[in-house]
Image: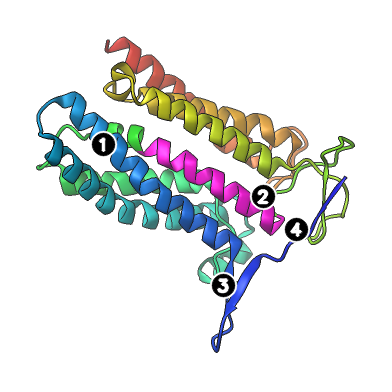
Amino acid sequence: MFYWDPRPEIFYIPIFHWPISWYGLLFMLGFACGVPIFAAILRRFFTFEKKYTKNEIIRKGSLLADRMIIYVLIGTIVGARFGHFLFYEDPSAYWEMFTIQNGGLHGLSSHGAAIGIIVALFFFRLSIKKSDPKLTLLRLIDFACIPTIFCGVFIRIGNFINQEILGSQTSLPWGVIFGHPADHSLQVPRHPVQLYEAAFYLFVFLLLWRLSYRFNYLMKEGRIAGLFFILVFGFRILIEFIKLEQSDLLHSSFITMGQILSLPLVIVGIYLTIRSKALE
């Protein structure tokens, strides 16, 4: 078995004694990588449109990606934070929603983040509606899915370093014993579900990135998003079977909060996939 007990902090800022954590670094690194990924997808879209020169395509892709990341970063943090307390915390803990512990916001929901990103893209769409009418909300969601899932790889690795979102007990040889579990659970060999998710998210990113080169995927509204929702949240439903329950609001041995929240998104993904094929 593998014993895992790293320090969550990289270093402390002198004088203020403010910790810089691995999770925070990985979170921001994921977003930093997302900007050029989104810009590249936009350039591909504008190239398929055949309306702009090469220099215009490069300029527009970079400009829109730089603007979009501000909206999405705010939407992700706000949505993930509110989602965590709404879906996973007892109402008595809501006062902690705006508190900062150990230099960061601990407690972020991926389902809340998904909603926050969609809301952010809605407002971003309003800001570019006149200048780029063909970049509809659904098309922006298509494009944003690819950098979002890549960012998810970094976030799950950060969860692993933080020893949070733990798996169930296992006797498999790659089981991990967490030295200081965030939920103060027993120090027993557990499935490293954070790494399972990170590996699957990387696979989904590579698949969607490859498909974004195809005209019939990139230019068909909802096709990439549909596949994203089916794969990511379908996998989330499965992986929850070997996870510890994260929610204080649900006490069931048959279904987890993560599965309840993932099922509607899988249905949305199926609808988007059928819709994109029906419009061909």
State the extent of the magenta-drawn residues as a range: 144-163
Q: Using residue 93 as the reference point, say whether residue 227 is left or right of it.
A: left
Disc sitting over residue 257 in the figure = none
Above or below 69: residue 125:
above
Above or below 101: residue 164:
above
Query: Magenta span: helix, strand or loop, mainly?
Result: helix
Above or below 248: residue 98:
below
**Mark 4 or mark 1, earlier in chain:** 1
Which residue is labeled 1 in the image?
A: 42
The scheme the figure's colours follow is rainbow
Image location (x, y in percent) of residue 265: 49, 31
The amino acid on which the numbered mark 1 sits, given as a three-letter code, is Leu
Residue drawn at x 56%, y 85% is 14
Residue nearest the observer in this picture, 95 or 168: 168
Instruction: Check the image and name the residue furthest to the bottom.
Output: 15
**Mark 4 or mark 3, earlier in chain:** 3
Image location (x, y in percent) of residue 18: 56, 79
Q: Which numbered disc, 4 or 3, marks the residue closer to the eye?
A: 3
Image location (x, y in percent) of residue 221: 29, 24
Which residue is labeled 2 in the image?
A: 247
Residue 102 is one of the magenta-drawn residues: no
Which residue is labeled 4 in the image?
A: 183
